[in-house]
Structure formats: C-alpha cells, structure tokens
C-alpha cells in the first residue's frame, strides 16, 4: 500500500504537470453527448422503449460521469515500455509492475471528481426532472460500483497490454476491444434498447459492470436486491479477471525472459 | 571473501527474425519469417568475489549485455547455472532484487517529466528504505556526485552528465551489494567520466560492493578493474588480471628516450625502431629485455630522459579482437 501511494503521488504530480491536457481529455469524451443528440431527435415524437427525452438526458450525462471516472489510457505507456525495453527495469524492482500501472490509471481521478462534482450540481440545477437518485445509500452503491467498474476496465486493459509479450503492438488489440466495450457496456446505446435476448446475454458479461450498471444505479433504476446482486456479480468479474491477468502475466514473463528482455 | 557472482557453463541462445530491407522485404517477412538462432553467450563460467570490481570487455554484439541481463535475472539462461548473492537470479525474489542493481548508460529509469527527486521517493517506497537510511544515502550521494540543485530540475531538462549522476544515485539508493553496470559512462565528457569513475571507486570502498561493468572506454577499465573478463562471439576468451592480459598479448614494451646530443647511432640492434628524430627515439623491445636494453642505451648515449611504457590498453584490446589472439 505504501508502494502504491508513492507511485500514486508521482503519477499525480505528473498529471499536475499536464493539467491542461487532462481538461482537454475530459472535454474529448463527447461520444455520450453525440449519442444523446441523436436519441433526443428520435424521441421527439414520444418515448423509445420507455425512454423519454429526460431519461435519455439523465442516461447519457450519467454515462459521461461514469466514463470520466473509469476510463483509462495507460496501455499507451505500457505498449511503449514493452517495446522500448524499459519494462525490464520494473522487473528488477521488488514491486509488481501492476502496482505502478494501477497508480497511473487512477492518478487523474481525484482531479476529475473536483471538476465533475460542481459540474453535476450545475446540471441538476439547470435540467429539471433529471432522473438521478442522490440518496446517501444509493450514492454509496454508486461509488462502490465505480470502483468495481474501474477495476474491471483496469484488469481488461492490463491483460490486453500483456499481449505485448507476444505481439509487437498491443494497441491494435485495444482498439478492437474498445469497439466491443462501446457496444456491450451500454456506453453508446442503453442496454434496455437491445432485443431482450441480447440484453439478457449482455447482462452476464463483464462489460455491463464496467458502465451500464453504474449508470443504472445513479439513475435509481435498480431495486435494492438488483443492486446487491449486481455488486456481487461485478466483484466476481473483478476476481475472475484478476485470475486471468495473473495467468497471462506469468506466461508472458516466461516468454519475455526466454526471447530477450 | 565469499563468492558473490557465479556462472557455470552459462549459455543463452535466442531466435530473431530476419527482415530484408524495403517494402517487399517487409511483405515477405510478414508472411514467412526467417528465424535465426543467435548464440549470445555460450558455455561461460566464472566467479566473482565480494568487493571485486571486474571489467567485462568485448566488441559490440559480443554478448556482454545479454550476460548482464542473465546475471541480473531478466533473462532465463538456455543452459547452465547462475547464482548471485546466493540466489538464483531468475527467481527474482524480492530479497535478491534488494541487493542488486542494473544501470544501463543508454537507457533511462527516471521519470522523464518530473524532477529526479520524485523518482527517488518512489524508489524509497519500492525498496522499503527507512527514513534514516534514505537521508544518509541522499547525503552521501549529494556529496559524492555533487547533486545539489540538479535534483529539483525536470529530468528531461538535465544534461546527459547530470542525468547520469541522478540515474546512478537512484539505482544505488537501496545500497545494493552487487552492481551491474552497462556502459555507465557512455556519451559523457572526460571530466564527467572521471567523476563517475571516482564515485564508483568510492562506493566500492565504502560499502564493499561487487561491481561488474562493461565499457568501451579503456580509461574506465584501467581505473576501476584489476581483473577483466574478455568475451568474443559469446565465448569467454580471457579471465584474469588486466596486467597479465597486457603481458600476454603484447610481448613488447616501449622505450622512449630523449638525448642531449643528436642521435647518429644505429639503434636497430636494440629492438624495433618505431620512430627516430634528432633528439628523440622510440623502440619496441621484448618485455624481458627492457631493463638490460635501457642500461645499454644509457651507456651508449647521452640520455636526458628515458621512459619504459606498456602499450595503450586500447591498442591491446583492439588487437585481441582484430587478430583473434585469444580465440581458441
């Protein structure tokens, strides 16, 4: 934990060096707003599958918050470290590199809270009837789900990054992954709008728990039972992905040390 | 003194794929890659005792860096055993990693966009260095390497020399007992090279650390290492004192003399005449005859000054590799 905090401190300082860049990055998460504009025009004539215009607004603003709080891009750094060989130095330190990358993945999050918090309050004031459930207990569930979503995305991206042990550019795998994530997580289209069979299938995959689940919680669309069940399933995915990650890590290391670090 | 580094019948082979240059070469490589086995090191054995400073010599691509990577635990050997500080390097146990360090002169370990002091703080936590040890180490390095205000400048704004000083300090913060240094002075100017050398000598003296280093600068090797390992095409061709290597490779010494009167005598009976001017001459004389020849010259000429020198180590090492003097 002390090692994580030291890494986090350095990553945070690094982020502050580039605070303008973080703001620009935050502003470039516009996909939900584009989707929102599209659905608003479609829903002009009446609700779509139970989603009114206000529901769409609530959904995509929540998606924007969740994406900001869980999105991460450390795979670029990982990719270059593996290609240029500086990962070797991390392997010679008495700390698993996963701690370093997790710290970097989290480093901009406190900064984003500082901006998103006030921004959300403004949204609540400006948009009447925003369907966000802000009761304390619900918010607690929401925050817990954000941590879980972050861990799922981190472990997915880290595992994809580890494919760099076998292929030269793991970034290409990540691009393919992002396409799947956008569709299957509810980031582009609410899962409710898929045919029931597809929706029920997506319900069990980890993607829902990296986006849609948190959005549903913030919007207060889940019963207490469904929320608890979701949290359990989410953390089961975290555990499963962690196990997968460690397995890939061990095999990758064996290869790395065999063919040249 | 106990053995700190031991390699026995160590080999490391790996495959690299070949690509012909140009677009069609790339296309061909994309569909059918040709692999070639590189024998980076082959059947290498040696032992290094605690506190020794050993130079690892060889031309580019001889296998020096590969050997350092195997010894530090980054690469798994194809065959043979390697043990450092009593550990199998490749296990990379935390207790082992806390006792070693690897510095590569051509690579950067510091956080590029932050001052070096930030990297030090991270290392302090990663190596679990106590506050007292950390302050003591910082004090020592600030003094020996003259770090001062360099610590608070962004790493990317440092000169190469300043950065190398910080690299060394960061890599030695946990006071490792075994140092693997790959070209630690590469690209540095002469003064800075000397500075780094003095620092390494001092670190070795104070902490009894074992050092294995590669360098292309002979001055590094001469100043730091009594013993050298010479590697060529992956094979160890010499292991022993630098001095005896010089004797073995170069059977001659140079006698340089300055006279009071112009030299008119024929010097060739004394040895091979390398150069002769009015008042100066250089002779290459077989090693065992140098003192006798010098005495004769004294009697014959009005000598003002005379020196007996070994050839430059650079010259000797160069000859080893171009003339394959040590190859079996």
Image (cartoon, coloured by chain):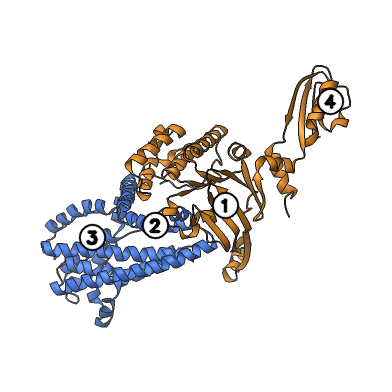
Q: Are marks 2 and 4 on the same chain?
A: no
Q: Colour of chain A?
A: blue
| Chain given the colour orange | B
Determine the image quadrant of residue B314. top right
Classify A158 as above or below B60: below
Labelled disc at residue A65: 3
Estimate the spatial distance between the alpha carbons at disc 2 and disc 3, rounded to whole Å: 28 Å
Estimate the spatial distance between the alpha carbons at disc 2 and disc 4, rounded to whole Å: 69 Å
What residue lies at 29% left-to-right and 68% top-to-bottom? A238
Estimate the spatial distance between the alpha carbons at disc 3 and disc 4, rounded to whole Å: 94 Å
Circle 4 crowding by C-alpha within 10 Å: few under 14, some 14–19, many from 20: few
- Judge left or right: residue B124 versus residue A166: left
Which of B263/B246 is in front? Answer: B246
Marker count (numbered): 4
Estimate the spatial distance between the alpha carbons at disc 2 and disc 1, rounded to whole Å: 23 Å
Residue A174 in the image, given as x and y percentages of width and height: 40, 65
Estimate the spatial distance between the alpha carbons at disc 1 and disc 4, rounded to whole Å: 49 Å
Taking the image as drawn, is residue B194 in sight? yes
Residue that carries the numbered disc 2 in the rendered image: A97
- Judge left or right: residue B256 versus residue B148: right
The quarter of the picture where the C terminus of chain B appears is bottom right
Element under disc 2? helix
Which of B130/A215 is in front? Answer: B130
Circle nearer the N terminus (2, 3): 3
Instruction: Kindly report which numbered mark, 3 or 4, lies closer to the viewer in this rendering.
Output: 4
Residue A256 in the image, given as x and y percentages of width and height: 50, 62
Residue B53 in the image, given as x and y percentages of width and height: 56, 43
- Judge left or right: residue B63 versus residue B136: right
Taking the image as drawn, is residue B277 in sight? no
Residue that carries the numbered disc 1 in the rendered image: B65
What residue lies at 58% left-to-right and 44% top-to-bottom? B54
Residue that carries the numbered disc 4 in the rendered image: B296
């Amino acid at each position: 934990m002390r090692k994580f905090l030291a890494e986090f401190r350095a990553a945070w300082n690094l982020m502050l060096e580039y605070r303008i860049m973080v703001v620009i990055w935050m502003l470039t998460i516009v996909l939900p707003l584009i989707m929102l504009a599209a659905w608003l025009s479609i829903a002009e004539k009446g609700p779509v599958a139970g989603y009114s215009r206000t529901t769409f607004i609530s959904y995509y603003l929540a998606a924007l918050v969740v994406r900001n709080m869980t999105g991460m891009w450390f795979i670029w750094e990982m990719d270059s470290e593996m290609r240029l060989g500086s990962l070797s130095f991390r392997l010679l330190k008495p700390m698993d590199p996963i701690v370093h990358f997790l710290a970097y993945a989290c480093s901009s999050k406190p900064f984003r809270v500082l901006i998103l918090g006030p921004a959300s309050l403004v949204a609540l004031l400006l948009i009447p009837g925003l369907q966000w459930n802000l009761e304390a207990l619900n918010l607690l569930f929401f925050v817990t789900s954000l941590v879980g979503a972050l861990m799922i995305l981190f472990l997915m991206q880290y595992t994809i990054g580890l494919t760099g042990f076998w292929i030269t550019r793991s970034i290409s795998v990540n691009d393919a992954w992002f396409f799947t994530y956008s569709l299957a997580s509810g980031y582009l289209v609410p899962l409710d709008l898929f045919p029931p069979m597809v929706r029920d299938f997506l319900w069990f995959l980890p993607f829902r728990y990296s986006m849609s689940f948190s959005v549903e919680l913030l919007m207060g669309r889940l019963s207490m039972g469904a929320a608890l069940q979701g949290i359990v399933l989410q953390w089961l995915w975290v555990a499963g992905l962690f196990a997968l990650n460690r397995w890939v890590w061990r095999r990758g290391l064996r290869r790395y040390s065999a063919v040249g670090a | 003194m106990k053995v700190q580094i031991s390699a026995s019948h160590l080999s490391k082979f790996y495959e690299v794929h070949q690509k012909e240059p140009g677009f069609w070469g790339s296309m061909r490589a994309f569909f059918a890659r040709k692999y070639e086995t590189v024998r980076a090191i082959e059947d290498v054995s040696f032992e290094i005792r605690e506190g020794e400073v050993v130079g690892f010599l060889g031309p580019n691509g001889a296998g020096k860096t590969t050997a350092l990577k195997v010894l530090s635990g980054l690469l798994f050997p194809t065959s043979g055993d390697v043990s450092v500080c009593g550990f199998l390097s490749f296990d990379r146990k935390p207790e082992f990693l806390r006792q070693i360090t690897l510095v590569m002169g051509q690579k950067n370990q510091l956080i590029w966009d932050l001052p070096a002091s930030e990297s030090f703080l991270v290392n302090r936590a990663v190596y679990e260095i106590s506050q007292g040890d950390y302050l003591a180490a910082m004090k020592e390095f600030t003094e020996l390497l003259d770090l001062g205000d360099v610590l608070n400048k962004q790493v990317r704004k440092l000169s190469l020399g300043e950065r190398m000083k910080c690299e060394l300090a960061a890599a030695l913060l946990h006071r490792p007992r075994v140092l693997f240094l790959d070209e630690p002075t590469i690209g540095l100017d002469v003064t800075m090279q000397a500075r780094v050398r003095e620092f390494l000598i001092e670190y070795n003296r104070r902490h009894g650390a074992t050092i294995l280093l590669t360098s292309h600068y002979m001055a590094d090797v001469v100043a730091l290492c009594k013993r050298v390992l010479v590697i060529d095409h992956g094979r160890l061709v010499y292991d022993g004192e630098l001095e005896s290597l010089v004797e073995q490779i170069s059977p001659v010494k140079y006698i340089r003399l300055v006279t009071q009167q112009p030299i008119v005598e024929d010097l060739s009976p004394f040895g091979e005449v390398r150069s002769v001017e009015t008042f100066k001459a250089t002779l290459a004389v077989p090693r065992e005859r140098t003192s006798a020849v010098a005495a004769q010259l004294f009697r014959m000429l009005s000598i003002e000054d005379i020196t007996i020198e070994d050839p430059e180590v650079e010259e000797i090492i160069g000859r080893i590799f171009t003339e394959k003097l040590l190859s079996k």
